[in-house]
Image (cartoon, helix red, strand yellow):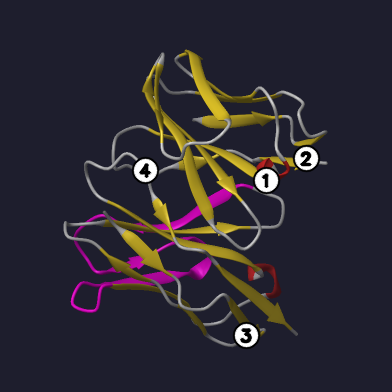
Amino acid sequence: SQTIHQWPATLVQPVGSPLSLECTVEGTSNPNLYWYRQAAGRGLQLLFYSVGIGQISSEVPQNLSASRPQDRQFILSSKKLLLSDSGFYLCAWTAQVGGTQYFGPGTRLLVL
Amino acid sequence: AQSVTQLDSQVPVFEEAPVELRCNYSSSVSVYLFWYVQYPNQGLQLLLKYLSGSTLVKGINGFEAEFNKSQTSFHLRKPSVHISDTAEYFCAVTHNSGYALNFGKGTSLLVTP
């Protein structure tokens, strides 16, 4: 069966520091991968998605970036965090376009 | 593009009472619809989905939803809730060539004794 992992589970970072969140999927090949951010009271916002290695699409311009160095690895990064980057970051995968998305456990980021 | 409106931000209900969480969508093409549940500090778990076929969809934990194309709705129901159903519920929509889900803002279900 397929599983999706995210780490770290929680992170407290100062403003202006860098960020690297990792997401990996097991048990499937060539998944579509997604990064969402969930801010309090605002639902889920799609940040990036990827349909293959090195292929990244950005939905919202901001100081975050994403990379997909391997088929089942998806990384969310920032060079300098802002207070507004605080939130709950969720990674998801799907086997096909329009298919069911399965979510990881999430990373809670607090920027101080 | 598709969008989702969850009409209630919070729904308080007593244990063993029925509940309905409302979801309306807008789209110019055929859609796929989903309900997810999120327990505190956890990821989202799929409750049920509508892709095609029967408009009444049954999911996990005793939940069901009905797709109503004329009313562009996909309301979630449960005949008798438990304390353990307390969570955030998200409705989402996509289409068969869409890369991402569009989520509603969520409905917080609070079940009390």
What amino acid is labelled 1 in the image? Ser
For the residues tagged 3 and 2, is the chain the same?
no
B43 vs B57: above or below:
above
As measured in the structure, the alpha-carbon distance from the residue carrying label 4 to the one carrying label 3 is 35 Å
User: Given the image, what chain letter belongs to the residue carrying mark 3?
Assistant: B
Q: Which residue is mark 3?
A: B16
Q: Depth check: B47 or B95 in front?
A: B95
Q: Quadrant of the C terminus of chain A?
A: top right
Task: Tell me which label, 4 or 3, sits earlier in the chain.
Answer: 3
Q: Which mark is residue B100?
A: 4
Can you say whether A64 is above or below B20 in the image? above
Disc with the residue nearer the chain's start (2 vs 1): 1
Q: Quadrant of residue A17?
A: top right
Disc 1 chain ID = A
Distance between mark 2 and mark 4 Cα atoms: 27 Å
At x 61% / y 47%, what residue is drawn?
B43
Look at discs 1 and 4 and give the one toward the viewer: 1
Q: Based on the picture, tell me whether residue B62 belongs to the magenta stretch.
A: yes
Q: Chain of mark 2?
A: A
Q: How far apart are the two marked residues, 2 and 1, measured between alpha carbons? A: 8 Å
Real-space CA distance between mark 3 and mark 2, rounded to the nearest whole angstrom: 41 Å
Task: Say which of marks 4 and 3 sits in front.
Answer: 4
The nearer-to-camera label among 2 and 4 is 2
Q: Which residue is mark 1?
A: A84
The part of the chain drawn in magenta is B43-72
The residue at the point 40 percent across, 14 percent down is: A53
